[in-house]
């Protein structure tokens, strides 16, 4: 039942049987339908989630009711409203499922206890947090100084094989362009590559 997350964990740290049992004992498994919310704006956020199956998106809704996608999470990715999670506050983001999904949640207090009980988990999550920070910085810099075509290529690199799984309008939203612009970007790239 926990194969996906254990395989993910063991890419960075090795666990013995007791450590594996301790870790899996704190996991909360959730099976979610397409379009079902994992987190809604205003929710108290005390869990971060590992995606075992499916694809989710994190987004905010501005004062005009427009959606702004800031992250996709597919298999082997982590997702939450991390600001709310770390500050033990209320969500400013919404997270819902693009596909049927299975996630494993880890409650913040349980995670803190895990760090004390099995210090190698502190290392694992530090490495994951560092990678997430670097990815976020790259995304910010990309949005500041790259063309929409370059941002699209960055998207393809950051999310390999995801383009076929999510609607074009969501990719366009993530890139900050109109769907028609995304079509032009793809055509221009295809022309250059042929």
Image (cartoon, rainbow, N blue to C red):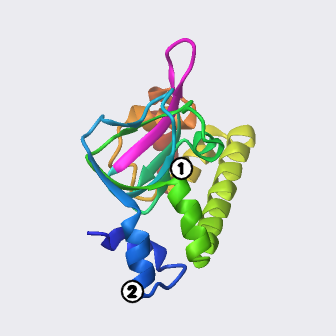
Q: Is residue 121 visible?
A: no
Q: Quick one: 143 or 66, which is closer to the camera?
A: 66
Which residue: 56% across, 19% down? 62
Q: Are marks 2 and 1 in contact (CB under 8 Å)?
A: no
Q: Residues within 10 Å of mark 2 (few under 14, many from 20)?
A: few
Mark 2 vs mark 1, CA separation in Å: 38 Å
Q: 146 and 109: which one is in front?
A: 109
The residue depicted at 38 percent of the width and 61 percent of the height is 27
> Is residue 179 or residue 139 the one in the foreground?
139
Identify the residue shown where x is 57% and y is 31%. 176
Quarter of the view holding residue 21: bottom left
Q: Position of residue 14 (x, y in %)?
A: 50, 85
Total marks shown come to 2
Q: Residue 35's image quarter?
A: top left
Q: Is residue 53 left or right of residue 85?
A: left
Q: What is the magenta segment's predominant secondary structure?
A: strand
Pick the front one: 75 or 39? 39
Going from the N terminus, do you reach mark 2 or mark 1 first? 2
From this view, report whether residue 126 is shown above or below residue 133: below
Above/below status of 96 relative to 64 = below
The quarter of the image holding the N terminus is bottom left
Tell me the residue that label 1 is attached to: 155
Within-10-Å neighbours for mark 1: few <14, some 14–19, many 20+: some
Kindly identify which residue carries mark 2: 17
- What percent of the width, then of the height, locates residue 82? 59, 45
* Kind of element beneath mark 1: helix
In the rendered image, the residue lying farthest to the top is: 64
Q: Magenta part of the protein: which range? A: 55-68
Q: Is residue 11 magenta?
A: no
Residue 147: image x %, image y %?
66, 40
In this view, 44 is above or below 2? above
């Amino acid at each position: 039942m926990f194969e996906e997350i254990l395989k993910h964990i063991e890419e960075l740290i090795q666990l013995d049987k007791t450590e594996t049992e301790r870790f899996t004992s704190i996991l909360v498994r959730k099976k979610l339908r397409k379009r079902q919310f994992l987190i809604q704006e205003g929710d108290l956020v005390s869990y971060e989630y590992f995606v075992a199956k499916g694809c989710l998106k994190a987004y905010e809704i501005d004062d005009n009711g427009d959606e702004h996608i800031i992250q996709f999470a597919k298999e082997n990715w982590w997702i939450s409203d991390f600001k709310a999670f770390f500050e033990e506050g209320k969500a400013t983001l919404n997270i819902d499922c693009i596909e049927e999904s299975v996630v494993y949640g880890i409650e913040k207090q349980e995670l803190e206890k895990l760090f004390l009980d099995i210090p190698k988990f502190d290392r694992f999550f530090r490495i994951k947090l560092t990678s997430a920070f670097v990815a976020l910085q790259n995304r910010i810099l990309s949005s500041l100084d790259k063309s929409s075509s370059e941002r699209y290529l960055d998207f393809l690199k950051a999310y390999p094989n995801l383009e076929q799984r999510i609607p074009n309008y969501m990719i366009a939203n993530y890139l900050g362009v109109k769907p028609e612009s995304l079509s032009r970007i793809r055509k221009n790239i295809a022309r250059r590559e042929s």
